[in-house]
Amino acid sequence: MAIAMALLWGILLSAVGIALPGLINMTAAKISVRDGRTRAVYFAVGATVVVFFQTYIAVAFAKFINSRPDIIYLLQEIGLVLFALLTIYFFFIAKKPKLKEEDSKIRTKTGRFFLGMLLSALNFFPIPYYVFVSITLANNGYLQFTPTLIWMFVLGVVVGSFSIFYIYIVFFKKIEHKTNWMMENMNYFLGSVTGLVAIINLIKIFRN
């Protein structure tokens, strides 16, 4: 049961984390429209490979943090400052995201695979995100940091991430008008999320 739950939590939390339109999702969708579904899938696989390593690093770091209660308070303070600054950035400084036109020379299957890896590697948000959610799951008894459960959680994240990418690849035409609106307002959404996390950290600090 614990193995199945770790897998399901990984799928669910990865879906929540990347369901909204972002650079990787939208690039996969654009590649599907312009170059065909096969090349878009290669791109998604490349992105997912990096997600695998990012998630494993994040959970390994979360395991270390969870075994050292003395540094959790310090990280909460750092997180409060970091997420507060990110909130200010997203609401008042960041420009509206635009999907740049890709280099037309990179259209082979291998090229799309490595492009997916590159864009995914440039996205650093998954690491703090999975550190945060895995520690939260562990503290609430939903996840134990055993080797088997860690691998199942990581596998769930991989499955969930690729599934969302594939949904964008297949159904982009049907949801294009919605994704365009969400892309225009992405900074406000991200600012709301980082603001919420900052408030949660502030509450935890005061409780301690």
Image: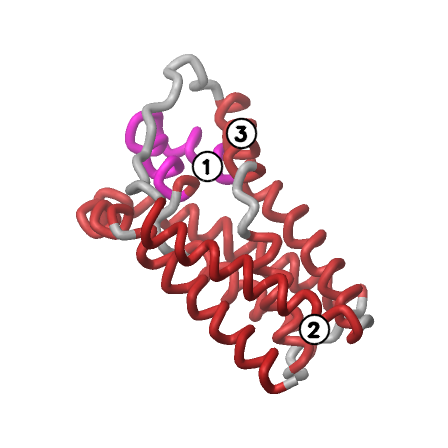
Q: Which mark is residue 41?
A: 1
Tag 3 secondary structure: helix
* Disc 3 from disc 2: Cα separation: 40 Å
Q: Farthest residue toward the bottom? A: 207
Q: Tell me where residue 141 appears, x and y as whole percent.
A: 67, 83
> What number is the disc on residue 113?
3
Q: Is residue 97 above or below residue 181?
A: above
Disc 2 marks a residue whose amino acid type is Tyr
The residue lying furthest to the top in this view is 105
- Classify the position of the C terminus by image quarter: bottom right
How busy is the neighbourhood of tag 2: few (under 14 within 10 Å), some, or many (20 plus)? some
Quarter holding the N terminus? Answer: bottom right
Residue under label 2, please give it: 73
Q: Please tell me how crowded label 1 is: few (under 14), some (14-19), or many (20+) other residues with Cα within 10 Å.
A: many
Few, some or many residues within 10 Å of mark 3 (<14, 14–19, 20+): many
Magenta residues, as a range?
25-45
User: Which is closer to the viewer, label 2 or label 1?
Assistant: 2
Residue type highlighted by circle 3: Phe
- What residue do we see at 43% from left, 40% from top? 24
Q: Is residue 106 left or right of residue 178?
A: right
